Amino acid sequence: MARAPRIDIADYQYHVLNRANARTQIFNTTEDYRLFMEILTDTVEFLDMRLLAFCLMPNHWHLILEPRVDGDLSRFMARLTNTHVKQYQAKHESVGMGHLYQGRYKSFTIEEGQYFYTVLRYVEHNALKAKLCPRAEDWPWGSAYLRARGTTKLLSPLPIDLSANYLIDLNAPLFASEEEAVELSENCSVPYASAVWQDNLNVIVEQKTTGKIL
């Protein structure tokens, strides 16, 4: 499947991720994680971005974002990654020694409801899947950790209500079909959504692109 044009319009949820160049580790120490979290927090505040979920992994990271202004997703990501590269390379004295990231970030839109719930679980389950922690909410560099402890100042309200059984669901693996569908959207930058929802989104994108009301 061909990669779709990048969508960057307000009030939609996006799964965004980026990986280290050659999949080498970019988070080797607690200080590396803390540095990124400080930059992420500053960038969220600077652009008034809704951060819905995140998970930092040793060689990549996942975010779920909901911009308030058209075009803010790309502005947010440019500021986040450029600042991180500069500060990381200065800290590790690696300026001029190659790329930190493998390339531009990947992103795709998410339909609300069950589609969003699946992607939220996919993101917050990541550290558990990689066997970095005994339970997903124990990973200190993920939003599940904050959510489980009620320290969610950095996070914006979710577009869905989580049930009392969320942590049980979170710690159970996704169905293979769900994981494959999310990864297809990730690899091809296509919405994770129903066909009808995607058609409606295409109309909205066309309206914004052409300036026409269809």
Image (cartoon, rainbow, N blue to C red):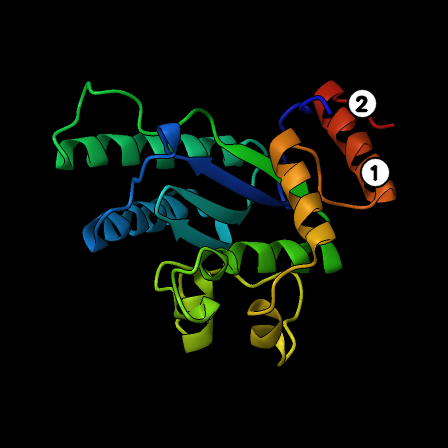
Say what secondary structure mark 1 lies in: helix
Observer-nearest of 208 and 91? 91
The residue positioned 77% from the left and 37% from the top of the image is 201
* Residue 160, image quadrant: bottom right
The residue drawn where x is 73% and y is 25% is 1
The answer to whether residue 16 is visible is: yes
In this rendering, position of residue 32 left or right of residue 136: left
Please tell me how crowded label 1 is: few (under 14), some (14-19), or many (20+) other residues with Cα within 10 Å.
few
Helix, strand or loop under label 2: loop
Instruction: Point out residue 6 in the picture as x, y percentages from the top left corner.
Output: 62, 27
Crowding around mark 2 (Cα neighbors within 10 Å: few <14, some 14 to 19, many 20+) is few
For this rendering, which residue is in front, 83 or 2? 2
Vertical relation: 105 (above or below) 180: above
Does the image show residue 152?
no
Q: Residue at x 55, y 70 (%)?
A: 171
Query: Residue at 52% across / 36% down in the picture?
Result: 73
Residue 128: x, y in percent?
47, 62
Q: Label for residue 200?
A: 1
- Determine contact: label 2, label 1, CB under 8 Å: no
Residue 1 falls left or right of residue 120 = right
Q: In which quadrant will I find the C terminus?
A: top right
Observer-side mark, 2 or 1, equals 1
Residue type marked 2: Lys
Q: CA distance from mark 2 to mark 1?
A: 15 Å
In the picture of the structure, the residue carrying the numbered disc 2 is 212
Number of numbered markers: 2
- Amino acid under disc 1: Asn
